[in-house]
Amino acid sequence: TKSLQMMAVDFGASSGRAVVGHFDGSRISIQEVHRFENEPVQLGERLHWDFLRLFHELKRGMMKAKQQLGRTPASIAVDTWGVDYGLVDPKGRLASNPYHYRDLRTELAMKEAVQRIPETELYARTGIQSSSINTVYQLFADEELRLGQNEGGLRMLFMPDLFHYYLSGTMASEYTIASTSGMLDAAGRDWSRQVLDALSIPSSLLNPIIMPGTRLGTVRADICAELSLDAMPVIAAAGHDTAAAVTSIPATDSRYAFISSGTWSLMGIELNEPILTERSRRLLFSNEGGTEGKIRMLKNIMGLWLLQECRRTWAMEGTELSFAELTEMAQHAPANASYVDAGDAVFLPPGNMPERIREYCRATGQAVPQSRPEIVRCILESLAFKYRQTLDEIEELTGERLERIHMVGGGIQNRLLCQLTANVTGKTVIAGPVEATSIGNLMMQAKAHGEVGGLEDIREVVRRSFPPEMYVPENASEWEERYRTYERLLVLQKTEE
Ligand code: LFR
């Protein structure tokens, strides 16, 4: 059989990577060729992504991929985090540098927007939980654009679409990334007229929705010349990183929940149709778009962001600690007795995370974790407890018992977190692959090349290629008891109607 050598570029909220993948028709292997930091830039009052630098890193990745393979890859696709976008003018110029979803300008806008269209209706249509990061609130916050009804003729491109545009010259909105916006009709899988109209968001900004696995065109001639590449197809694989990760979950049936673990933890299940009930809204579940028209019903949990931010604060205080060192510290921390709600939006903005965690514990009448090991332990246990809560909620919403948890993504390198997750949920955790997002990206390209069939075939390839690691629950009854305490303290008042 023919061997396909492709490349994927995955931009995460804290780092990015370019990989090459070899697919021989049965197995896929991947090799990282370039890795880089993705650090946001505070410019004046606003928090931005450094798009130009990121585009530069993309090109460096392409150059290194060619060097590694000794020839131009068979195709390229980009995936990124959700919700953010760039605006492009009629001449194709970037009208402004993309904002970071953690920028605070949307907070007021969100309050104003829900005066125009109630959150209940927004949810019933889009299936997306209300959050200040959502594209819909970011666009609503852009008064000039909204009130001027886009007289400048700008086009809005989500981050993966923006990279693809500057690579290929083709403008399109890939379904999985567009589904994070809060502006798609979840069931109809297209832009929601009602939402756009209610918020006066100009539809002239928008591009047609295309499904994952669509070929967009080829890399522009000037970029090929710059990087000495041959003509190379650009494919909209699964533009949303989480959608790409879920595509490559090595599951054999549907009785599992997934956790895509990185800066965020996205926990959920795959469905054929969205759940748009008042209960799922109150429980803060989103219905995002998956590959093959599937729905990813999931909850956004703060994830390793809590730890990344503590690490950044401690580095500024003069102590540089690796994630391995942080976890090692937590292993030997005194028994933990305090928890935070790892779904709480108070943890969204950057800055002084250790103090905010202490403050949360204080305000909820718990012991206040003082030392660094105690804080790290509190974070990891709080994440595991949040996963347990989310699992119970998914079972409630679907009326079905889940058997396993598939954890994928960089966060599974934290083995303590995987084991805690098994302990607190009482379910077997199947961890892997670490590079699920890049693998999902590559396999969707292979699909576009006609070299693999549907989602089931893709998952079989992943199972064959990357044997996962298993975590079996330990000390179940002790953890069950501790979970009951957490539940009384942080769950029950919030979720009971
Ligand atoms: C994960 C992710 C989440 C999205 C968040 C913000 O990287 O894409 O799915 O909710 O980033 O965009």
Image (spheres, rainbow, N blue to C red):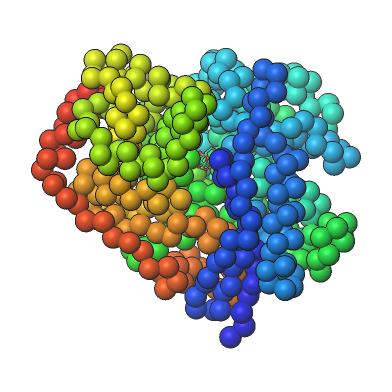
Which residue is rendered at x = 46% and y = 50% of the image? 410
Image quadrant where residue 386 sits: top left
- Examine the rendered structure and indicate whether residue 390 appears above or below residue 113: below
Say if residue 310 shows up in the picture.
yes
Which residue is rendered at x = 54% and y = 79% of the image? 25
Residue lying at the far left in this picture: please name it. 477
Say if residue 286 shows up in the picture.
no
Residue lying at the far bottom in this picture: please name it. 1
Q: How many labels does the image show?
A: 0
Query: Is residue 302 shown left or right of residue 237?
Result: left
Residue sitting nearer the eye, 158 or 272: 158
Image quadrant where residue 219 sits: bottom right
Which residue is rendered at x = 58% and y = 20% of the image? 104
Residue 453 horizontal/vertical position (percent) = 53, 72
Query: Is residue 458 shown left or right of residue 3?
Result: left
- Examine the rendered structure and indicate whether residue 77 appears above or below residue 132: below
For the N terminus, give its image quadrant: bottom right
Query: Is residue 140 shown left or right of residue 422?
Result: right
Residue 38 horizontal/vertical position (percent) = 62, 41
Which residue is rendered at x = 48% and y = 40% of the image? 263
For the C terminus, give its image quadrant: top left
Residue lying at the far front in this picture: please name it. 318
Residue 392 horizontal/vertical position (percent) = 25, 41
Residue 360 horizontal/vertical position (percent) = 34, 19
